[in-house]
């Protein structure tokens, strides 16, 4: 049974934080741009480094397109709502209120940087058309024969493509 801990009395899991829009820019020493995304929404408590990693590495969608994520709230919603839907489908919540408590508490923990998922979760979960790979590491076995060795490289490549390692 889920109980509210951090979100008691809050209208939503983000309302006790001050939020701002930042321009995330990564430049080379010569001033040329490596990455730029304007109007990234994050809590004011987040460091420049945290907002840069969020925007460059974890936001999904083509840079400059309207579909591109631009807010921490969006990426948390993408991931947490996907987990909630899966939990409901699997019977992990006794009712909708339990699912809402789970979602609010997890969203609070993530936005306040009290917890985080590994990179494959942020890369993949809730993104349409992408395998919902959430594990960071996989253990592969290989036999001492050419077919097994070549298959190992193939499997490892597929795992790396999803943002994980072997």
Image: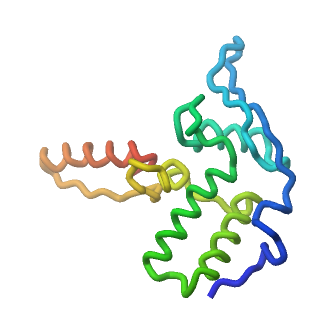
Q: State the image quarter where residue 138 is shown.
A: bottom left
Q: Residue at x 59, y 29 (%)?
A: 64
Q: Nearer the viewer, residue 145 or 24?
A: 24
Indicate the position of residue 98 as horizontal and vertical percent values. Answer: 62, 82
Indicate the position of residue 102 as horizontal and vertical percent values. Answer: 64, 75
In this rendering, position of residue 44 left or right of residue 117: right
Q: Please identify the quadrant where the N terminus is shown.
A: bottom right
Q: Residue at x 43, y 50 (%)?
A: 128
Indicate the position of residue 40 as horizontal and vertical percent values. Answer: 72, 39
Above or below, comparing residue 108 to residue 125 in the picture: below
In this rendering, position of residue 77 left or right of residue 147: right
Q: State the image quarter where residue 109 is shown.
A: bottom right
Q: Nearer the viewer, residue 166 or 79?
A: 79
Q: Nearer the viewer, residue 60 or 140?
A: 60
Q: How is the image coloured?
A: rainbow
Q: Residue at x 47, y 70 (%)?
A: 86
- Disc tally is 0
Q: Residue at x 65, y 83 (%)?
A: 2
Indicate the position of residue 44 as horizontal and vertical percent values. Answer: 85, 47
């Amino acid at each position: 049974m889920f109980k509210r801990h951090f979100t008691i009395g809050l209208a939503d899991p983000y309302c006790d934080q001050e939020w701002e829009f930042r321009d995330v820019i990564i430049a080379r020493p010569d001033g040329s741009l490596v990455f730029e995304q304007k109007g990234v929404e994050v809590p004011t408590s987040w460091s420049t480094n945290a907002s840069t990693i969020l925007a460059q590495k974890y936001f999904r969608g083509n840079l400059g397109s309207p579909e591109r994520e631009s807010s921490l709230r969006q990426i948390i919603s993408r991931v947490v709502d996907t987990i909630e839907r899966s939990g409901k489908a699997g019977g992990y919540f006794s009712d909708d209120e339990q699912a809402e408590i789970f979602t609010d508490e997890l969203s609070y923990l993530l936005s306040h940087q009290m917890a985080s998922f590994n990179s494959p979760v942020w890369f993949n979960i809730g993104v349409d058309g992408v395998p919902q790979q959430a594990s960071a590491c996989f253990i592969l076995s290989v036999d001492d024969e050419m077919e097994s060795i070549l298959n190992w490289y193939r499997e490892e490549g597929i795992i790396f493509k999803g943002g994980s390692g072997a």
